[in-house]
Image (cartoon, helix red, strand yellow):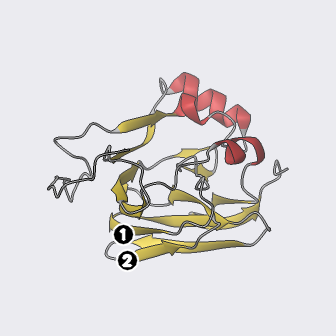
Amino acid sequence: MAQPVKAFTTDFDLKTGLSKKTPSTKRQLSSMKGMYANQEAYNQKLENENDPLIYEFYELDIPQTSGDVLFGTSIVYPGKVGNEYHMTKGHFHTILETGEVYYCLSGEGIMLMENPEGDWQIEKFSKGQAVYVPPRYAHRSINTGNEPLITFYAFRADAGHDYGTIETKGYRKLVVEKDGQPELIDNPKWS
C-alpha cells in the first residue's frame, strides 16, 4: 500500500512553465513519428533541423491513488511540420471517465478533443483562460502562435495515460495553417 502523500510545496516558473526541482520529459520530433499527416514534411524537418524539441512537460512523481491529484505544466514550442502546427501526441486517460483542467499561462493555441464515439470538440487557449476536458475525451494541445504555449494541468492521479490508441488511430481532425490562420480539417489518414 502506498504511503499517503504529505503536504508539499513545489515550484514552476510562470514564464517558462519549468520547475527548478523537477526535470521535464522532452518530446523531440523523432518521438512524434506518425503523428503528422505529411510524412515527407516530417522527414525533411527531422533531417534539416536536427530533431527539434516539439514539447516538454513535467509532472510530479506522486502515488497514483484515486484520492490524489496529479499536476504539472506542458510547454509546446512554436513551429510547424508542413502546414500542421506543433502539438502534443495527445492521449486518452486509462481510466476513461477522467476529466482534466488546463490553465493557459502564456501563448495561444487549441485543445483538440474527441471521444471513442466520434464526437470531437475544440477550445482555444489564451493567457488566463482555463480549458476543461470532459471525461472520455482524448486531448491534444496545439500551439498556433509564435511563442511557447504553456499550460498548467491537473487530473486524478490514478487516471493513467493511453497514448497507444492515438498512435494507432490518430485524431479525426487536424489543425493546419491556411492563409496565416489556423483551420480545422478532416484527417486524411484517420482510421
The numbered dot on residue 129 is 2
Note whether 123 is above or below 39 in the view shown. Answer: below
Q: Residues within 10 Å of mark 1 (few under 14, many from 20)?
A: some
User: First in sequence: mark 2 or mark 1?
Assistant: 1
Percent of width and height locating residue 87 = 53, 50
Query: What label does residue 186 carry, if any?
Result: none
Q: Amino acid at mark 1?
A: Tyr
> Image quadrant for the N terminus?
top left
- Image location (x, y in percent) of residue 84: 62, 51
- Please state which of residues 45 and 157 is positioned toward the viewer in this rendering: 157
Residue 108 figure quarter? bottom left
Q: Residue at x 48, y 47 (%)?
A: 79
Q: Is residue 26 above or below residue 186?
A: above
Front residue of this view, candidates 137 and 6:
6
Kindly identify which numbered label has been placed on residue 103: 1
Residue 148 visible (yes or no): no
Callout 1: SS: strand
- Position of residue 66 in the picture relative to residue 189 (left or right): left
What's the residue type where badge 2 is placed?
Gln
